Image: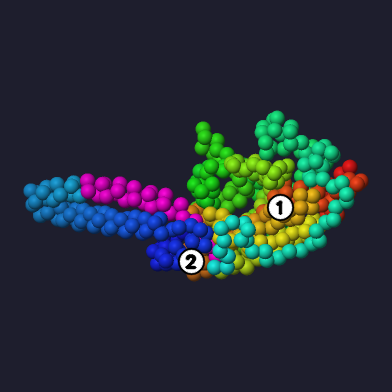
Amino acid sequence: MLQLNFIRENTQEVIDRLAVKNFNAIEIIQEVITLDNNRRETQKKLDDSLAEANNLAKEIGILFKSGKQAEANDLKTKTADLKVISKELSEKLEDIENTLNQTLVQIPNLPHHSVPRGKSAEQNENIHQEGEIPQLYEGAVPHWDLCTKYDIINFELGNKITGAGFPVYKGKGSKLQRALINFFLDNASENGYLEIQPPLMVNEASGYGTGQLPDKEGQMYHATIDNLYLIPTAEVPITNIYRNVIVEEKQFPIKNTAYSACFRREAGSYGKDVRGLNRLHQFDKVEIVQIQHPDKSYETLEQMKEYVATLLRKLELPFRILRLCGGDMSFTSALTYDFEVYSAAQQKWLEVSSVSNFESFQANRMKLRFKDTNGKIHLAHTLNGSALALPRIVAALLENNQTAEGIRIPKALQTYTKFDIID
């Protein structure tokens, strides 16, 4: 959530920067300012009423001591009237503040000044590419056919048990999943991330804290009786560990990692681009999260970007890094790098990670603050990244490493899988 004072003091800048995200903010920003003016005016009236009542109470006490009971009683009647007025003003103030907050949470985060303009993924900026595109043997097939051939992932069985987008992993397919999860977690731990095992469901406050609510409400699975949400990513429960927390400056950087199943409705997704592992409703992912000092968050973002790149190098996958344009960015992000790996049998790039800096946007929603060396309180910055999401990594690994004899396992994974080929 944007800070109210920043909106008031930089109104035109906020409108201009949100336009980079193709968000027309003119009306909602004006609504926020009007509501805040009403809030301030109502707060002043309430403060004046309470102050007057307090002064009258002192005067009544003096009158009673002086034996002026009639005059004191007259003032008591006025005090009673002021109590009614104060109660009405307090209720009005609460209504205004609720409306103001509900309006503020509908405004996206400001994009960083380096974010390119654009309306869709086609305008994203390719800033880095490495690795050779594999040349497959004659007879190579997409991963969904490989999964059937080697009986490692069964999409039809998942459809029977649950529905489309919930595959069943079997045999070496299951072992490959577990190997990748452990590989990613071990790498994160070696790089200073504390492993967390979070809940797979969160409450409404957690969803609002990281910005999934109200923006992505329709994309989350909602257990309505208990008003809990299945997590779309471990970012949500991990970051909310620090909701309503004041940390010490010396604790930075705070680095957490977690493996979790992730659940996304992906409403409206259909067609050839979602076939097989390309888009699922339930999938596995290892997430990295950092809480950082505002002065160091962009340096940290670059470090996280490089860390994800090292994972892809170890897996021997060709990849590219994109700086997302305004129109392809999330509601909460200030700057996002997407990683895509090349899937040789499909002859296309598949997104496998997003690494983002949210600056103080999530922290302001969550009241995640830090105390500096002088004892002053400030909002922290939050960052996260997929390191990595499994489905499209698995798709690319299967397709790029297929041979006539079977599917080769990258050397870095073999100590985790305990086998070097799927045949």
Q: Say which residue label 1 marks.
A: 350
Is 349 located above or below residue 198 in the figure? below
**Where residue 239 sits: x, y (%)?**
58, 52
Calculate the distance from the C-alpha at mark 1 to the C-alpha at mark 2: 46 Å
Is 96 located above or below residue 113 in the figure? above
Q: Say which residue label 2 marks.
A: 375
Residue occupying the point 82% across, 45% down: 141
- Sequence-wise, the earlier of marks 1 and 2 is 1
Q: Give the tally of numbered discs.
A: 2
Q: Main secondary structure of the magenta part?
A: helix
Picture colour scheme: rainbow
The reply, left or right, for residue 94 in relation to residue 261 is: left
Near mark 2 (Cα within 10 A), the count class, few <14, some 14-19 or many ≥20, is few
Residue occupying the point 32% across, 59% down: 37
**What amino acid is labelled 2 in the image?**
Gly
**Where residue 395 sits: x, y (%)?**
76, 47
Q: What segment carries the magenta color?
A: 83-112
Contact, CB < 8 Å: mark 1 with mark 2? no
Q: Quick one: 193 or 317, which is closer to the camera?
A: 317
Residue occupying the point 76% across, 44% down: 177
Q: Which of marks 1 and 2 is in front?
A: 1
**Where residue 301 sits: x, y (%)?**
63, 63
Helix or strand or loop: what does disc 1 sit on?
Answer: strand
| Residue 84 covered by magenta stretch | yes
